[in-house]
Image (tube, grey):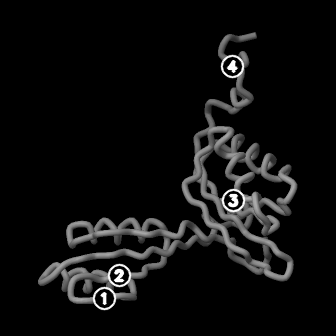
């Protein structure tokens, strides 16, 4: 056997060297009960997978179901492994790789949005400029006094990143982001 293809002690040596890591958005439908989120997160941390974004909320109150949206990175082989491992967790009803599904539907990416609360403190010209830029980004003022604003902004992560970067020199104080909420376009459900 060629020395390059010998097992390294890890199951992940199987991943082709030509595969490049990609960002994927996973949607996981689970029972809304104590410990489920810890088991899902434990799967990631126990195997050394990173979670770039995590959003959880009950979506079907009558059925006691919650939807977990996870943004993570890995090769296609690793993403397939993550999906299969998630499916084996008992209270998991369904796992959909929204990124793969969007490609199957002929779309580049799933529809993804984040919400951020951004606190900016300042006076004078910086204050006026922060308000002007917030309007250009369609951010709403949800709290204000003579010393600060708190803006609410919704959009793609890149839009939020850009808004935050622009607010830094104008007196950025604090940021709170929700994480990604995502679904595929079209009439089909998860």
Distance, label 4 to label 2, CA atoms, is: 51 Å
Q: Disc 4 designates what residue?
A: 8
How many discs appear? 4
Answer above or below: position of 98 versus 1.
below
Q: Earlier in the sequence, mark 1 or mark 3?
A: 3
Q: Residue 28: which quarter of the image? A: bottom right
| Side of 147 where 150 appears, left or right | right
The residue tagged 1 is 144
Q: Secondary structure at mark 4?
A: loop
Q: Which of pointers 3 and 2 indicates the residue nearer the eye?
A: 2
Q: CA distance from mark 1 to mark 4?
A: 57 Å
Q: Residue furthest left?
A: 124
Residue under numbered circle 2: 150
Q: Residues within 10 Å of mark 2 (few under 14, many from 20)?
A: many
Q: Mark 3 — residue?
A: 26
Q: Is residue 153 above or below residue 7?
A: below
Residue 91 in the image, given as x and y percentages of width and height: 85, 59
Q: Nearest the camera: 99 or 160?
A: 160
């Amino acid at each position: 056997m060629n020395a390059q293809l010998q097992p390294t002690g890890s199951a992940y040596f199987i991943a082709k060297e030509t595969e490049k890591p990609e960002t994927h958005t996973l949607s996981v439908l689970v029972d809304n009960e104590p410990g489920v989120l810890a088991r899902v997160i434990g799967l990631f941390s126990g195997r050394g997978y990173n979670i770039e974004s995590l959003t959880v909320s009950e979506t079907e109150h009558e059925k006691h179901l919650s939807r977990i949206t996870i943004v993570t990175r890995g090769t296609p082989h690793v993403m397939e492994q993550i999906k299969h491992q998630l499916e084996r967790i008992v209270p998991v009803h369904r796992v959909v790789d929204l990124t793969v599904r969007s490609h199957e539907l002929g779309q580049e990416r799933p529809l993804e949005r984040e919400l951020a609360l951004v606190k900016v403190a300042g006076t004078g010209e910086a204050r006026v400029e922060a308000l002007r830029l917030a309007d250009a980004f369609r951010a709403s003022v949800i709290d204000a006094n003579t010393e600060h604003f708190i803006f609410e902004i919704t959009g793609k992560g890149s839009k939020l990143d850009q808004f935050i970067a622009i607010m830094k020199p104008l007196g950025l104080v604090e940021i709170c982001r929700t994480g990604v909420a995502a679904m595929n376009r079209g009439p089909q459900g998860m």
